[in-house]
Amino acid sequence: MSAPRILTSLRPQLRLARIALPSPSTRSSFSTSIRRLDNKDDSGRPQAAHPSKHASRPVSSGEPVAEHVKEDESKRAGLPEEPMDGPPPPPLAALPAQELFHLKNRTILITGGGRGLGLTIAHACLESGASVRCMDLLPEPSQPQWSKAEELAKSKGLEITYHPLDVTDQNAVSNLFSDLFKMDSKEHPIRGLFTSAGIQIMMPAVDYSIEKFRKVIDVDLTGTFLCAQAFAKEWFKRHPSMDGQAGVDGASIAMTGSMSGHIANLGIECAAYNASKAGVNQLAKNLALEWSRKGIRVNTLSPGYIRTALTAAQLDEKPELNKIWLQGSLLGRLSTPDEFRGPVLYLLSDASSFMTGADLLVDGGHCAT
Ligand SMILES: NC(=O)c1ccc[n+]([C@@H]2O[C@H](COP(=O)([O-])OP(=O)(O)OC[C@H]3O[C@@H](n4cnc5c(N)ncnc54)[C@H](O)[C@@H]3O)[C@@H](O)[C@H]2O)c1
């Protein structure tokens, strides 16, 4: 290429390089320090948002932002021993890290709490200090897990109660949530909902009857919505002026989606289920948009395969699935319900105070490939 043509082709890069370099007059006093965004330098350009004792520098200087910056401790917010200008840090900052996951002094509502994942989470909530109200289509919860949960509750001075409910029945949902909020105590106010009620029907899409398709959507998606809606209605009646302040006295809704809301599962034909779970993920984002500034965070948990009654039925129907599912897992195994205690406690507790409208994918690496 001729010299002029090389220059022509390099011109845009040269122009960019000129913009990135400080002018000769500022080069001598050049500093890597930066100030708050509301400050402006002589050129009127905004400065980076980090506080510092040092001179400001344009954010567009082309240098790594905040490199070698000496932090002004008095302006750092968050930890109790580090004061800041302006409003005091939220009380959450005073909680020691090991207590962030506690659910002390609150009650958690759980749908699908009669067995499987829901009942395991009920047990974990009790262990973390919360009272629990379980709802499920089953007339009675599964034994012996339920009796164990009752014993645990008694030993900790907490409550666990069981309430038969069809999550697709709007009136029943609305009445039960209203009753549960009326049972609320000052010591253990309701501050969380975990939705775990769900069904799965495997069938090739061309054979899917409309009744079955609607049933899956009705339980997994509409049922989740109805419970979240009933929760929010009762919450807003009691907390008309709450905002998005981190974790403080707010509520958290954690909805069970699935990795199947992100992918199509090799080996099984379950279009309705997967569509319903993708819907749950999208529902949570929209409810988070509407409710996060009114005191309710909304997130989803997307589990990979869990060994429960639900998957046992699938494996009974198609034993070859076991091999296919194991191949898809980077950990080479299916999960057990107890492996979701940590993720769900995180979502329900103040540990996730800045998380809303998000999905927590816990799938043994399945979706990574
Ligand atoms: N097991 C898995 O591999 C897996 C993976 C990803 C997501 N999930 C999801 O986790 C959740 C729990 O599943 P699980 O594996 O514990 O299954 P599970 O069948 O043991 O539990 C589901 C519970 O929902 C209840 N339920 C069903 N229809 C209901 C209705 N109309 N009203 C109220 N309750 C109803 C059932 O009675 C049951 O107790 C489900 O939402 C499921 O889709 C499961």
Image (tube, rainbow, N blue to C red):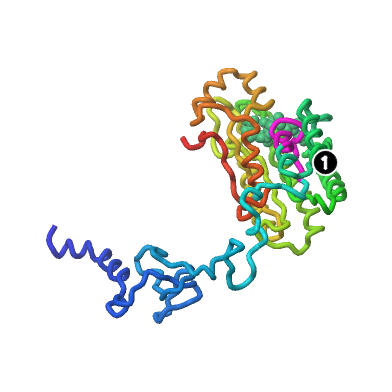
Q: Name the foreground residue: 353 vs 29.
A: 29
> Along the horizontal axis of the image, is 19 left or right of 304?
left
Q: Indicate whether residue 114 is drawn in magenta.
A: yes
Mark 1 lies on a secondary structure that is: loop
Give ligand 1's quarter of the image.
Answer: top right
Q: Position of residue 339 (x, y in %)?
A: 62, 34
Q: Which residue is drawn at 72% across and 39% down?
A: 127
* Foreground residue among 281 and 239: 239
Tell me, yes or no, if residue 354 can be seen here.
Answer: yes
Relative to 273, is 5 on the left or the right? left
Quarter of the rendering containing residue 341: top right
Q: Position of residue 212 (x, y in %)?
A: 70, 30
**Residue at left offset 43%, top offset 67%:** 70
As drawn, 177 above or below 327: below
Residue visible at 58% across and 35% down? 260
Residue at 71% across, 60% down = 294
| Residue furthest to the front | 81
Picture coordinates of residue 31, whole percent (x, y): 36, 72
Give the residue type at disc 1.
Glu
Mark 1 highlights which residue? Answer: 159
Which residues lie in the magenta part? 108-123
Can residue 214 be seen here? The reply is no
On screen, residue 105 above or below 337: below
